[in-house]
Structure formats: C-alpha cells, structure tokens
Image (spheres, rainbow, N blue to C red):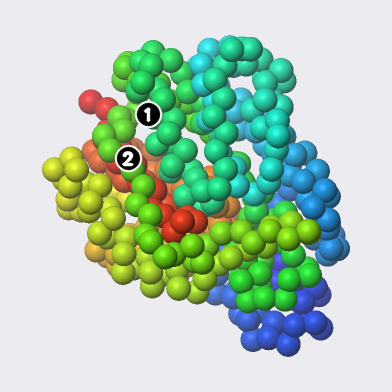
Amino acid sequence: MVQKEAAALARSVFAQRYPAFERMARVFETSGIRTRYAVQPALWYLEDRSWPERTAAYLEGADTLFVRVARAALDAAGLDASSIDTIVTVSSTGIATPSLEARALARLGFRRDVGRVPIFGLGCAGGVSGFSVAARLAEARPGTNVLLVVIELCTLASRPDSLTKANIVATALFGDGAAACVLRAGDGGLAEVEAAGEYTWPDTLDLMGWDVDPQGFGVIFARAIPPFAEANLGAAVSGLLESRQLCLADVDRFVCHPGGVKVIMALERALSLPQGSLDHERDVLAEYGNMSAPTVFFVLERVLKEGLPRRAVLSALGPGFTASLVSLKRAA
C-alpha cells in the first residue's frame, strides 16, 4: 500500500468524526514511509471488526507468512524441516492457541518431537529478544538447529472506532511483515553472539503496549518514546558492552529497529552516531513501515549484503519499557 493511499483511507475513516484528524494527518507525510504491506485488502480496514474477526484474519495471515519465511530460512541454511530441533516463534499482534509453529508443523514437515517456544508480549523488541533466546537455546545444545520465526500483523489492530492520537499515529506507521533464520552453535557460521540482554526501566509501563477491549487490541504509543530513547538507550547499550570489556567505540555498526523517523534520529544521538548513519534503517522504514518485531531483521539483511562488520549490535525498544540488545562478532 502506498502511503498516500493509506492517508486517503484514514481520512475517509476519521476526518468526519475526529476534529483533530486534519491537524494530525501530516504524520502520514512526515513518517518517512513510502510504502507498507498489509495482509488484508484496503476495504477490510474500513469496517469495525470484532475480536473473532481480527483473530481469524491473524491466524490466516500468520499461518501463510510463517510457512513462507520458514521455508526461505531453511533453504538459506541448506536444511529441511526435519533437521530443526527447536522452533522459537515471536508474535505479539494476535493470539494463537495452538501456537503458530504447531499449526505449521505438518505443512512444513517438522519432527513430532521438535521443541516449541512461543513468545508473546515483547512488541517491537521481540525480534532482538527472540534472537537472544534462540541463540541461548542453540548454545545450550551445540550441534542442534534452532529456527527463529518472527511475525507481526500490526495492521489488524487498526481501529476505526478509536478516535485517539495514538491510533492515528499507529495507522500512519505500522505495516505487516515476517522474518526467520536458523541458529546453530559450535560449527562456525556468519557470526557469533558474544553478548545479549535486556534492560527494562521502572515506571514506564505506559510508554508502549496494548490496551485490550471487546473489539481487540488498542495501541498504547506515547509521544515520549523518542526523547526517552535519546536520554536512556546509550547507558543501556554501554552496560551490555561493558560486561564484555567493550565500549560504544568498539561497535562497527548498530543495527536498530527503526520505530519511526524521530526514533531513528533519537537513536543516532543516543549512540553518538553522525546524523544519517542509520541509513538502512531509514530505507527499511520507507519501504515497509514499522513492522514491529521483524523490522530489525530487514535491516540486518541489508547489512549482511554489504558484508557484516567485525562487530555489530542489534537493538530494539519495546513494551516494558525495554531495550533488547544482541552483540554479534563476525566469524573468523
């Protein structure tokens, strides 16, 4: 979906009922987004949807994306599904019980004894945290294969009934997407995980998350996120690096979740980077919007195509309010 089309769609839904819409509509132009993807056609989002309708759409879309990205990750690793020992599935934009990997088990040919680790509630930080969890599971059992699948269908939380600033901003920013990769410990590869962790700030539960009501999820998305990131992320990253006797100057490339243009600028200042350094982040945001948890892997893919530097740090911010961090050291 082209961003201009999304803006016109939002105007048709909100303008007559929400006096502040025209003043806020500029966010569609200043978001830095040109295109986004959605699992449903545009007309689907014009109607109020019930919780069961949103859940049905989530299950259908997530099942399809799970199979697609899992197959791509297996092909890239030169493996078939029966070689996977553990599946880590990250998603916070819908509820699936049985979880998504169980639903895809027969279609992809996973073994009946495959380990399953579904993760919910980490929001935009879920991709980096999921990577950390998958890496620890692989390290605990060297020689085993861990498949990480990250899926977020953010557009299904679009709420025509919610006349709030947070909902308008979310409508302008979020898209749908998925990513997957295979992690294995003990036999080389592209890189090793040399450090990983999370940092959660106290008294920040109201910065980001979901508010749940009979129609589904409603976004909690505070304006304070960019200044909070600028003021606090640097210390969190430094703390992780110091645990390995490293500092910010030892990092050759930060690979960040691009939450929005203002967030990217705040990250550059927080990490003492020259303005414009997070170029791949801006490009991914422009082409895909904020897909929540998978977005950082779209950035990482571009970094890998250029050639992974000696040390790269993945970072993402999510509900909690939490920074999720992984330091990657290029394999020798």
Q: Circles 2 and 1: CB distance less than 8 Å?
A: yes
Residue 108 left/right relative to 45 = left
Q: How many marks?
A: 2
Secondary structure at badge 2 equals strand
Q: To which residue does mark 1 refer? A: 136
Q: Quadrant of residue 268?
A: bottom left
Q: Residues within 10 Å of mark 2 (few under 14, many from 20)?
A: many
**Residue 185 spot, x, y in % from top left:** 35, 20
Q: Quadrant of the N terminus?
A: bottom right
Q: Is residue 18 above or below residue 73?
A: below
Q: Is residue 10 visible?
A: yes
Residue 54 left/right relative to 194 = right
Going by the numbered disc 1, the residue's amino acid type is Arg
Q: To which residue does mark 2 refer? A: 196
Farthest residue to the front: give it. Answer: 203
Secondary structure at badge 1 equals helix
